[in-house]
Image: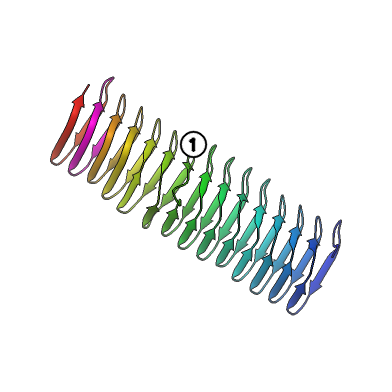
Amino acid sequence: MNNTAGGSVYAKDALNLTLGGVLQNDQGVLRSDAAMDLKAAGLANTNGSVSSAGTGALNFNGAVVNQGGQIVSDAQLTLTSGSLDNSRSGRISGKGLVLGTGVFDNHQDGRLTSTGALQLNAGLVDNSGAGRIASAMALTAVVTGLNQTNDGRLYSNSDVSLDMSNGLLNNQSGQITAPGQLLLRNLNVVNNQSGKISSANDFTLAATSLDNTDGSLVSDKALIVRIAQLLTNLRGQISANGVTLSAAALDNRNADLSSLGSLTATIGQFDNREKGRLLANGALLLTAGGLN
């Protein structure tokens, strides 16, 4: 079906389309004032618009290209695809959103947002260059890799659950924040250079390695950090109201590791030179194999 270059399909009631091929909607408009149900091999929606006032159920076996386009629902939106390109100011939103896809490109101001809960299941996710993945209610994401370099942000006004499936989390100059519960699962290598990972509640970050150079890892309550290999905190900040930290090696040069409550640190090799600080308002217990 070709609805490109100013084409328009409008339904006052429910809109149901089942296509064997790709739905071509570049610079086109596909709109329903009620529910929308689309099934096709793929969707080409560059600078196009797909919208529904009612629930949206969109199922594409192959690629969805939404560069500069919008796929929106005033109600619950469910979108499945083989891959998804929502880059270059693409917009996908719903009042409750479920997205299942393979590779997900949301870079350069892409927006995946929900005024309700958001559930994301994807392969590699590129949320760099001011991409946004956000929800007003709980956000749950299961991905195989996440790139948030250059102001990518993943956040919720409630809880955030992020399962990395042992893939790379690159949060360089990015943000992962939650005023509610922050649950980080199956982390492997974490790059938080100049990035921010924070929660108003207790949370645990357990990973193979963590580079927090010029970054911040902050909890308003208790924070547990478990790093199997090297934790680099050069000029970084790790702070909470109660910190428990373990690492095979910690580079804390010109950095702060601090707690408003107690602080317990178990470290193999500890480099605290160049004005590195280890501070606690409560009890401080340091166990280190070697100290500089």
Q: Which residue is mark 1?
A: 173
Measured from the top left, where is residue 78 in percent x and y?
61, 68
**Residue 33 placement (x, y as % from top left):** 72, 74
Identify the image quadrant of residue 51. bottom right
Residue 185 drawn at (x, y percent)? 39, 53
Q: Magenta part of the protein: which range?
A: 257-274
Q: Magenta residues: mostly which secondary structure?
A: strand
On screen, 126 above or below 72?
above
- Residue 264 in magenta? yes
Q: Up-down: is 2 above or below 231? A: below
- For the point 55% across and 61% down, the residue is 114
* Quadrant occupied by the C terminus: top left
- Label 1: few (<14), some or many (≥20) within 10 Å? many
Q: Residue furthest bottom?
A: 13
Task: State the colouring used for the structure image.
Answer: rainbow
Quadrant location, the N terminus = bottom right
Residue at image position (79%, 62%) is 22
Q: Is residue 231 magenta?
A: no
Query: Foreground: 10 or 292?
Result: 292
Q: Secondary structure at mark 1?
A: loop
Q: Residue at x 29, y 43 (%)?
A: 226
